[in-house]
């Protein structure tokens, strides 16, 4: 199956000819996003996320490497027919209103005004702009503009959605709505490539994550794989005899006594031995699982404040 | 359909462009200022110096028409440059180019938008010419289509030149270069003067390379007197307009080529 997005060894350097400066934005970045996946694209500011998205859309050309979007070269109209795009800091024609703008985009999408008479109205309602459709976009708040950006991205029922910070400028309820919308799109089998700084949202809605820093890929994989925190195992037992405490300290294990159970986090190396000792001591093992870290922990570990390579 | 939608949207943005509104106000004020001496001269005619007044009226009317026509070239260049640069600067181009729109379609839409505006300008210019002639007590002798076609072709050339330049440089620099080109194009027009050889060698290629705006001037065929119409054959019109359209097309293709390879973001 053709991947929705294929980045192979992509390098992009910004050149300031007059100043004679060269700023590498991406260096040999390779990744794939499969069809139907919801993939997060993470990295600190200046990591190269927006550059990558601009390359995917054909707004920029790479200096090196190959990019395919839905099997086509970036910028190919056959690919763009199937893409919905929400850029960072969306800019609209301020003299238009939401209705006129969406109608303009309908024509650009090759659908024409008569293609779906109710489509514009439905989209406006979907992003909660009903009642504001006749208001000039120049008078919209940041959140309203962002909603409109999402509406125009959904206009042509795209197979692939490229969302660059879709929740920026939205209030908490707006963020929840966007998350719900992404869930719905995921259920409908759409591929979503999402750049965001809100890691808790990403953790909830994405299947995969690609992390870049300083223009280089630092990690990619399914969230399940990425969030397995090394070799740590959590054992939940009904009790923990006091004589076990020196042994746990020796293994650098941690434990937490709760009213009805004890949670022990230990290296996988000692898992079997500890379980056997607990059984032998008459303890009951309630559960045993691999410790899952948070995306935020992983992100901070890989990227830190954005200065680590 | 897409190209037409972009063109109409471009035209819509022009009507809300503050700089263009300021330009229109200054333009109207300048034309009104020109009217003052015209009316004074008419008063002179009534005082008995009819022959002298008639000559002055005709030269004034001719001057105003030249001014309006010349300003149109600059307006066409500015609008073309601004139509693309403002989209790049504001980022509105990203939403448009995210749609299944080819880069040449976008640029052609912008160009058509400029030409729509300039068509309106030409209509206004035509009306103004008649009005001035009427105020001055003179008559315009020309074929109507000539007064529309020639300035439009000239504006098409300058708009295309500005489009090429703005895909490469800043819009202000674009206007600077357009101004220089316009002046140089006028200077290198063939004249009776004998020049030094080295200047002649420079002048001829420049004359060939730059658009011949005087050749495409509608004033060649416009007589603001009671005299007969300046005659021109169909073949002359055809070759002149074909030259102008060909020039505009070549420059527009250059603009499309240049635009195809440029970044669409504010990097």
Image (cartoon, coloured by chain):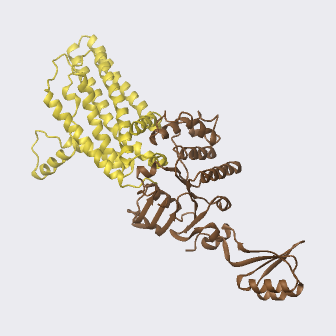
Tell me where residue A33 appears, x and y as whole percent. Answer: 52, 62
Tell me where residue A86 appears, x and y as whole percent. Answer: 54, 50
Vertical relation: B39 (above or below) A124: above
Chain depicted in yellow = B
Q: Nearer the viewer, residue B24 or A165?
A: A165
Q: Report the side of A232 relative to B123 (left or right).
A: right
The residue at the point 43 percent across, 46 percent down is: B100
Tell me where residue A96 appears, x and y as whole percent. Answer: 52, 36
Tell me where residue A285 appears, x and y as whole percent. Answer: 82, 77
Q: Nearer the viewer, residue A298 or B128?
A: A298
The residue at the point 20 percent across, 36 percent down is: B242
- What color was chain A assigned in the picture? brown
Q: Quadrant of residue A196?
A: bottom right
Q: Quadrant of the C terminus of chain A?
A: bottom right
The residue at the point 14 percent across, 50 percent down is: B199
Q: Report the side of A45 relative to B154 (left or right).
A: right
Vertical relation: B64 (above or below) B257: above
Look at the image and tell me whether residue B267 can be seen.
no
Vertical relation: B132 (above or below) A297: above
Look at the image and tell me whether residue A124 can be seen.
yes
């Amino acid at each position: 199956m053709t991947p929705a997005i294929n980045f192979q060894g992509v390098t992009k350097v910004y050149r300031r000819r007059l100043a004679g400066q060269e700023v590498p934005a991406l260096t040999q970045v390779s990744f794939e996003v499969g069809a139907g996946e919801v993939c997060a694209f993470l990295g600190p500011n200046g990591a190269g996320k927006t550059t990558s998205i601009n390359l995917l859309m054909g707004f920029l050309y790479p200096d090196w490497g190959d990019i395919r979007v839905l099997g086509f070269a970036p910028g190919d109209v056959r690919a763009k027919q199937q893409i919905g795009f929400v850029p960072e800091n969306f800019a609209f024609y301020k003299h238009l209103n939401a209705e006129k703008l969406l109608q303009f985009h309908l024509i650009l999408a090759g659908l024409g005004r008569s293609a779906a008479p109710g489509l514009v109205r439905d989209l406006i309602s979907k992003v909660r702009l009903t009642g504001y459709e006749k208001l000039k976009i120049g008078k919209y708040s940041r959140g309203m503009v962002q909603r409109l950006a999402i509406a125009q991205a959904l206009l042509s029922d795209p197979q692939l959605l490229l969302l660059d910070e879709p929740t920026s400028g939205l209030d908490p309820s707006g963020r929840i709505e966007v998350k719900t919308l992404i869930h719905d799109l995921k259920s409908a089998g759409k591929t979503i490539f999402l750049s965001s700084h809100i890691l808790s949202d990403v953790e909830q809605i994405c299947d995969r994550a690609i992390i870049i820093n300083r223009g280089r890929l630092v990690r990619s994989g399914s969230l399940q794989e990425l969030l397995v925190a090394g070799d740590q195992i959590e054992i939940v037992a009904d009790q923990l005899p006091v004589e076990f405490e020196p042994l746990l300290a020796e293994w650098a294990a941690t434990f937490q006594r709760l009213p009805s159970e004890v949670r022990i986090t230990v290296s996988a190396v000692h898992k079997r031995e500890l379980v056997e000792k607990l059984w032998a001591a008459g303890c009951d093992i309630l559960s045993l699982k691999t410790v899952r870290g948070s995306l935020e922990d992983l992100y901070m570990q890989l990227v830190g404040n954005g200065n680590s390579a | 359909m897409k190209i037409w939608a972009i063109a109409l949207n471009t035209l819509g943005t022009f009507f809300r462009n503050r700089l263009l509104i300021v330009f229109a106000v200054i333009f109207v004020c300048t034309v009104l200022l020109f009217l003052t001496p015209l009316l004074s001269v008419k008063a002179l005619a009534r005082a008995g110096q009819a022959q002298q007044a008639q000559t002055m009226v005709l030269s004034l009317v001719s001057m105003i028409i030249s001014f309006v026509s010349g300003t149109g070239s600059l307006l066409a260049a500015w609008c073309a440059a601004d139509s693309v640069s403002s989209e790049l600067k504001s980022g509105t181009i990203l939403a448009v180019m995210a749609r299944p729109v080819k880069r040449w379609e976008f640029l052609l839409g912008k160009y058509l938008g400029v030409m729509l505006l300039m068509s309106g300008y030409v209509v206004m210019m035509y009306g103004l010419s008649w009005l001035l002639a009427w105020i001055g007590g003179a008559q315009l002798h020309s074929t109507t289509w000539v007064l529309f076609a020639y300035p439009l072709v000239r504006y098409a050339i300058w708009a295309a030149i500005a489009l090429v330049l703005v895909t490469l440089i800043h819009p202000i620099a674009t206007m600077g270069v357009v101004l220089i080109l316009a002046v140089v194009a006028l200077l290198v027009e063939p004249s009776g003067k004998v020049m030094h050889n080295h200047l002649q060698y420079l002048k001829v290629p420049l004359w060939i390379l730059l658009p011949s705006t005087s050749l495409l001037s509608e004033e060649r065929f416009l007589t603001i007197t009671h005299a007969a119409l300046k005659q021109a054959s169909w073949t002359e019109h055809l070759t002149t307009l074909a030259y102008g359209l060909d020039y505009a097309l070549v420059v527009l293709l250059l603009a499309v080529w240049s635009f195809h390879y440029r970044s669409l973001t504010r990097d």
